[in-house]
Image (tube, rainbow, N blue to C red):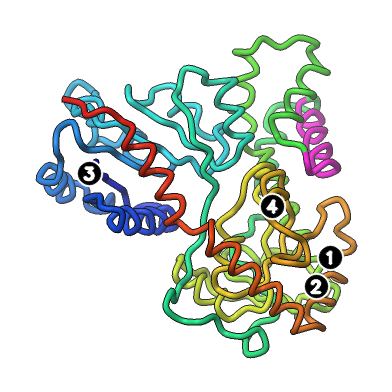
């Protein structure tokens, strides 16, 4: 079996995902090595003792190890993965539009793995030369795998939101950076997305660009997409804030675990309970104590978020908006509770009805747990990755 290198020591959540996959890969029978990006020189020395020529691969997240780090380049600026003929399998947990500068200089034997099927389509269109797939949605972790989940009636928090908030005005410097005409153009896209939240950023951007310019060459369109990441962030945080705001202003207490929530304006701020920012394990601990875990999708319209499966695996009712992919696997009122981004006025009522019926919440939580346990843990994703890397020929 292939030896596998993973990264930790940089982005905490991605290091946590890597450790979950690495543990599952060890159970399958792979030797694994966790490279600590916080201590690169020591890790490099250990890696060369682990490395086996022709039988070692890299599984990484979001271009770690191929973002221009000095310690992965030789004196000729050649990446270590090319110099040692190490295939890389990069799981990209954000939209590819954020990474054009890296996608234009990937290693030779590079495989791009998307967590959303729209991201996969984007890669096929704008970077057809890059090997892609398989589609690999994010997964979840049960914090205490050998213990039963705490019953809904014994849980500490009614509703929690695990994640950060950023004031949308933060991105206005990008929206207004040129002139009034461009400002109006960008706000036109933002208004379109907020009015039609089932649309993707690239879908709306292309429609608005073509309405302005009639014909846009494909290469110019690709360049334009890379310059519109602030649109994605603006609409993402606008909706995340609006949804939490709706609940707290309706009298529902929401405990928020993350940064930035103190900047959310609310009429009834007494219902917004500000808690500390937590690491991955800390978030899972809070999910073990929540009746309802609120999720707002980060504009993934054909994928999932790990919050969904983490909530289910740790016994909370997942209250979330949906996506094309989620519509295929989730069942509203059975294993989760769904709300519609175009009918947000009904969200407080949905939440209140859940909280008023602990038995129904318990039934939903139990069904959600079974759904996630049977197919949406990191060990399930590891099996897919195992099958993929074992197809890789032995390279000498």
**Tag in front: 4 or 2:** 2
Q: Which residue is mark 2?
A: 351
Q: Vertical placement of 86 versus 309: above or below?
A: above
Looking at the rendered structure, the secondary structure element under dot 3 is strand
Labels 3 and 4 touching (C-beta < 8 A): no
Cα gap from disc 3 to disc 1, whole angstroms? 48 Å
Marked residue nearer the N-terminal end (4 or 1): 4
Q: Which mark is residue 3?
A: 3
34 relative position to 145: left or right: left
Decide which of 196, 308 is in the foreground and name it.
Answer: 308
Residue 196 lies in the magenta stretch: yes
In the rendering, at what x and y percent does residue 301 appear?
Answer: 69, 42
Q: Which residue is mark 1?
A: 347
Looking at the rendered structure, the secondary structure element under dot 4 is helix
Labels 1 and 2 touching (C-beta < 8 A): yes
Can residue 301 be seen in the rendering of this structure?
A: yes
Q: How many marks?
A: 4
Which secondary structure dominates the residues rendered in magenta?
A: helix
Cα gap from disc 3 to disc 4, whole angstroms? 40 Å
Looking at the rendered structure, the secondary structure element under dot 1 is helix
Cα gap from disc 4 to disc 1, whole angstroms? 17 Å
Labels 4 and 2 touching (C-beta < 8 A): no
Marked residue nearer the N-terminal end (2 or 3): 3
Marked residue nearer the N-terminal end (4 or 2): 4
Q: Which mark is residue 237?
A: 4
* Region in magenta: 182-198
Marked residue nearer the N-terminal end (3 or 1): 3
CA neighbours of label 4 inside 10 A, class few (<14), some (14 to 19), many (20+): many
Residue 195 lies in the magenta stretch: yes
Q: Image quadrant for the N terminus?
A: top left
């Amino acid at each position: 079996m292939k030896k596998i290198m993973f990264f930790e020591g940089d982005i905490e959540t991605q290091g946590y995902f890597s450790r979950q996959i690495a543990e599952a890969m060890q159970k399958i029978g792979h030797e694994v090595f966790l490279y600590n990006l916080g201590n690169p020189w020591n890790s490099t020395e250990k890696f060369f003792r682990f490395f086996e020529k022709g039988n070692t691969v890299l599984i990484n997240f979001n271009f770690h190890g191929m973002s221009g780090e000095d310690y992965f380049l030789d004196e000729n600026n050649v990446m270590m993965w090319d110099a040692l003929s190490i295939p890389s399998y990069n799981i990209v947990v954000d939209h590819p539009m954020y990474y054009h500068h890296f996608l234009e200089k990937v290693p030779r034997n590079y495989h791009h793995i998307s967590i959303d099927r729209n991201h996969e389509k984007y890669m096929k269109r704008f970077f057809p030369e890059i090997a892609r797939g398989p589609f690999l949605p994010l997964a979840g972790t049960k914090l205490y795998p050998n213990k039963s989940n705490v019953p809904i009636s014994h849980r500490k928090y009614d509703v929690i939101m695990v994640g950060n908030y950023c004031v949308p005005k933060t991105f206005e410097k990008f929206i207004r950076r040129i002139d009034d005409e461009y400002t109006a153009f960008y706000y036109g896209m933002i208004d379109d997305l907020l009015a039609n939240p089932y649309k993707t950023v690239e879908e709306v951007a292309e429609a608005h660009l073509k309405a302005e310019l009639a014909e846009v060459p494909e290469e110019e369109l690709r360049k334009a997409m890379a310059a519109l990441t602030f649109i994605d962030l603006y609409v993402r945080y606008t909706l995340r804030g609006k949804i939490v705001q709706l609940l707290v202003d309706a009298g529902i207490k929401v405990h928020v675990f993350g940064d930035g929530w103190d900047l959310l304006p609310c009429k009834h701020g007494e219902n917004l309970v500000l808690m500390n920012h937590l690491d991955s394990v800390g978030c899972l601990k809070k999910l073990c104590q929540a009746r309802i875990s609120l999720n707002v999708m980060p504009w993934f319209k054909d994928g999932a978020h790990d919050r969904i499966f983490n909530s289910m695996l740790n016994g909370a009712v997942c209250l979330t908006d949906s996506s094309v992919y989620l519509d295929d696997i989730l069942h509203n009122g059975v294993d989760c509770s769904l709300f519609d981004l175009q009918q947000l006025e009904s969200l407080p009522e949905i939440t209140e009805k859940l909280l008023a019926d602990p038995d129904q919440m318990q039934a939903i939580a139990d069904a959600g747990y079974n759904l996630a346990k049977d197919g949406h843990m990191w060990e399930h994703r590891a099996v897919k990755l195992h099958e993929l890397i074992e197809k890789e020929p032995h390279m000498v």
